[in-house]
Amino acid sequence: MAAPGLYRVGSHLLARGHPALCSPQCSLLSAQAARGHRRGAQSFPVIPGDILPIYRHVYEANTRNSDSCGHRYLELLEKVKTGGGENAILRHTQRNKKLLVRERLKRLLDDETFLELSPFAGLGLPYGDVPSAGCLSGIGKISGIWCMVIANDATVKGGTAYPISVKKQLRAQEIAIQNRLPTVYLVDSGGAFLPLQAQLFPDKEHGGRTFYNEAIMSALRIPQVAVVCGSCTAGGAYIPTMAEETIIVDRIGTIFLAGPPLVKAATGEDVTAEDLGGARLHSRVSGCVDHFAVTESEAYSCARMIVSTLNYDPEPEDRAQFEDPVYSAEELAGLAPHDYSHTLGVKLILSRLLDGSKLLEFKADYGTTLVTGFASIEGNLVGIVASNGDLTHDASLKGSHFVQICNQRDIPLLFFQNTSSLDHLPPNVSKAEELTNRLKAQASMIAAVACATVPKITVVIGGCHGGESFAMCGRSYEPNFLFLWPNARIGLVDATRLSWSGQKDEGWTDKKEFKTQLDRLKEESSAFYSSGRLWDDGVILPQDTRRVLGNCLKIISQQKYERTDSQRSPLLRM
Ligand code: COA
């Protein structure tokens, strides 16, 4: 039995007040309170954002690094946009007469505002490149409602699921649960990528978890709609069948556990895909789907109509009033630190992201290596927690206090993370004592961050290294979203602070071997390496950060306008 104040839904234990359990009454109050906060936020002080001439060389070095990371970003974006390549696109569009996945999204969504998540997932893996992990995921508006969309890209090996595809789908469902987003699946998949079946079938966080989550989401009253716009074979067959409402496209959609070749091998019988599991069979005989669409376009407009029956109230229009920052976002490229030693004051970055460049600082003169305070982003009140140097004892206590304040007041937290690892052993006893005290204070901040139930968003603007990254809401601390700037470096140890001269005393004798290991560490610390493995929700350019955060905050706040009650069982297909 769940402890008092906790609700059990499947294996999820949700605390009272968890967004997934929010009541309409508390929602209304929060919405009214938010309007009052925004008016007050306009009188917060403007933070100075001028970059002093003495920092020009740092600014220029950072800009050069940002340019080169930006090129890599654009190159990879271009690469993933072509999915499985030219031949696969021809097979998909001309032989199979299907729309490409991005065309499908255009027909499904209200407009081009689509927060695509982890587009680089699947690149540079030991088993090769799997563009976009073979499935697109992201959040866009359908009939005025923010929805999570998970769409297979059948140009990538028939839309089959690689281990990274499963991870991407599970992350998308986790985001949908955390932010209470209706979810639409565009299913076009040959099921498991068989050569890697051992890495994607048997374990808890493997294929079956997707269907488990569908039931849990339904029990949490998170609606799910599926469009069968291609093959749904084996594992792929469960997605539409577990969804609350499903549409199938005539002569394009099929659902079966084993396709015609397998039937032939097992029984010797020749059967067409249409007769075995086509649109007419499933809409007239099996009842596995609920709507029959003659064309793909008809299917997406049907999905849009279904979303409009969810009975959600779209967010009020008045959220759109806010001030732009005083300072230019283009200068963020010169502020994105090339390495830890190229870090300028974080307020220079904040002054280019916050509404009116305004910040009401909390404990401005205490623990100054962490900047904390209240601000607005595109009209949404937020609590800022930004690295401004090492997370010292005082900075950690300040962070811990501020995180608890935001939690008390229901204010989402934004973490701007730039941490470094300790690169040497303490030289004497008093330094060791200082580090121990710091550890104790960091433990308190880690606990405050872990237990904060308000929405959290993390942007890694520089380093994500060592234990300090936990206190700054790293991935394990379940931020609703975690993004990386292209210059970000992710690794237990900060490779840019290691040198042969420093390491000789630590026992290294072979300089060549040391260099090989250091190069490997640098490669494994890049933002693109991380994103390929889905340790984050995507790489975003510094100049796009404000827009992305603004959208995330709107997406998160949609749940304030939802109707919920205490129903706790999934909808069962009849
Ligand atoms: N595992 C690994 N690779 C698979 C695969 C699977 N389950 N299903 C398809 N592929 C690969 C094909 O080998 C082909 O690779 P290639 O481009 O290197 O030649 C590519 O995906 C496209 O498949 P193809 O059959 O040429 O395309 P299609 O559009 O005609 O058909 C499917 C796509 C998915 C309908 C069809 O391939 C199919 O039925 N696959 C088997 C599905 C299955 O039995 N799954 C069981 C999983 S438990």
Image (spheres, grey):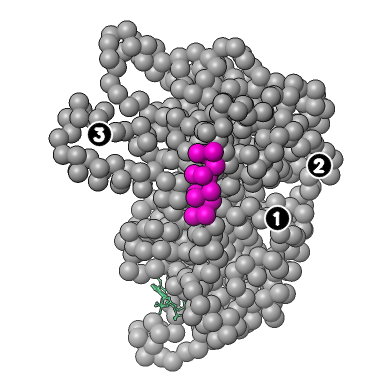
Eye-nearest disc, 1 or 3: 3
> Label 2 near label 3: C-beta < 8 Å?
no
User: If the picture is divided into quarters, which one holds ligand 1?
Assistant: bottom left
Q: Is residue 521 visible?
A: yes
Cα distance between the residues tagged 2 and 1: 15 Å
Q: Tell me, for residue 500, which label it has, or none.
A: 3
Q: Which residues are magenta?
A: 60-73
Q: Quadrant of residue 96?
A: bottom right
- The amino acid at mark 1 is Thr
Amino acid, disc 2: Ala
Image position of 525 with respect to 89: above or below: above
Q: Which residue is mark 1?
A: 113
Identify residue for label 2. 320
Q: Is residue 383 above or below residue 169?
A: above
| Label 1 to label 3: alpha-carbon separation | 48 Å
Give percent across and percent down for residue 558. Answer: 72, 43
Say whether marks 2 and 1 touch (CB < 8 Å).
no
When the figure is inspected, residue 303 is found, relative to residue 249, above or below; the finding is above
Pointer 2 or 1: first along the chain: 1
Q: Mark 3: which amino acid?
A: Trp
Q: Nearer the viewer, residue 512 or 358?
A: 512
The x and y percentages for residue 437 are 39, 12
Q: Residue at coordinates 45% horizontally, 14% vertically from top-left?
A: 393
Question: Which of the two labelled residues, at mark 1 and mark 3, occupies the earlier sequence position?
Answer: 1
Task: Residue lying at the far left in this picture: please name it.
Answer: 509
Q: Is residue 60 left or right of residue 325?
A: left
